[in-house]
Image (cartoon, helix red, strand yellow):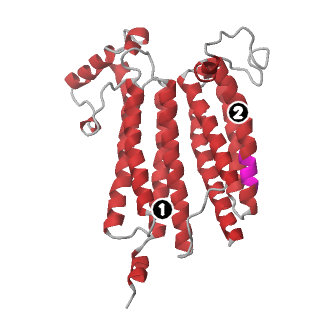
Amino acid sequence: MLQPSAAFLSRARPRALSRWLFAVAGLIVAMVVVGGITRLTESGLSITQWKPISGIIPPLTQAQWQAEFDGYKRIPEYAAFNQGMTLAGFKAIFFWEYVHRLLGRVIGMAFALPLLWFAVRRRIPSGYGWRLVAILALGGFQGAIGWWMVASGLSVRTDVSHVRLAVHLLTALTILAGIVWTALDLYALHRDPLARPARLTRVGAIALGILFVQICWGAFTAGLDAGYAFASWPLMGDSLFPAGVPMLAPEWRNAVDNPVVVQFIHRWWAFAAAAALTVLAVRATRAGSRAGFLVVALVVAQIILGIATLASGVQIVVAVAHQANAALLLIASVCAAHAVGRGAMRAAA
């Protein structure tokens, strides 16, 4: 007869949980892509109410569509930029915001319902339940952050706050990183029932931190439409930094609110991120992981896509590819950091 602990281990299914989490991670990448399209098509303010439950059903009748359109007509963005828009034009921007919100609900159900099933069936290995519940709670909070972001553009502003946009994106990517790290821990547990969760090493923390800073300034760049400021590279116009740029007071605000300065920071911090991720890639390769090669390839692709985004005048396909590649780079970087952490644990043992 199995002892209680052995009986519990026999019911745990770390590989099944790992596969489920990787599937959810894929949905989050799709969400990041749709979010980028929503931003670039100026669709984010087309739905002016937050209805977490009833909002899953789109307008079905002409009267319902007209009511949604009338709500949009009452916000500053319509008065400033879209007066004269037809109902058909409104439906086009409504589509992307609706898909973005719908995908958020799908991700929530794709996480919550399997988690409940795994918990009821006692398939979750010991020590992982609290982590999965924390990710679920952060996902719910992300929905509130999304509405907080949209609300910033409904009364005074003609667009959403770029700071709130950055918070929204970084929270989504934090969830993505947490899911991937947990999935890797669970897969390691499947391969070795005695495996412990990997620890985040200093090199991993620094590299991921620098990458998150770069993504944050990427969100500022998108939110301020700073990508349109200068389309040349490596110079901004005729110089490394253009002369005569109006500056804000106090000076620190320029790093956050001045489109030219924000683009400048995003351009050159990219190389700090590239250097840090290259170091991480080398460490991961030494630890026996192939993730390091993928990190380097995605870093190169990200820099090329960033330059192409500027040179194309923020052409939507290129810009969305740039954002999607950032999410993939984060996943690869988390895999590399996880491999370095496991290698450090083996060395210590």
Q: Which secondary structure type mostly characterizes the magenta part of the structure?
A: helix
Residue ID for mark 1: 19
Give the image quarter of residue 54.
Answer: top left
Give the image quarter of residue 73.
Answer: top left
Residue ID for mark 2: 269
Can residue 40 be seen in the rendering of this structure?
A: no
Callout 2 amino acid: Trp
Q: Is residue 228 above or below residue 30?
A: above
Q: Position of residue 324 (x, y in %)?
A: 57, 40
- Circle 2 SS class: helix
Callout 1 amino acid: Arg
Q: Which residues are magenta?
A: 277-282
Question: Dot 2: few (<14), some (14–19), or many (≥20) neighbours within 10 Å?
Answer: some
Single out the mark in the foreground, 2 or 1.
2
Q: Position of residue 14 (x, y in %)?
A: 47, 69
72 sits left or right of 131 in the view? left
Circles 2 and 1 in contact, beta carbons < 8 Å: no
Q: Residue at x 68, y 73 (%)?
A: 349
Q: Position of residue 276 (x, y in %)?
A: 73, 45
Q: Is residue 123 above or below residue 104?
A: below
Q: Give the CA distance from mark 2 to mark 1.
A: 34 Å
- Circle 1 SS class: helix
The quadrant of the image that shows the N terminus is bottom left
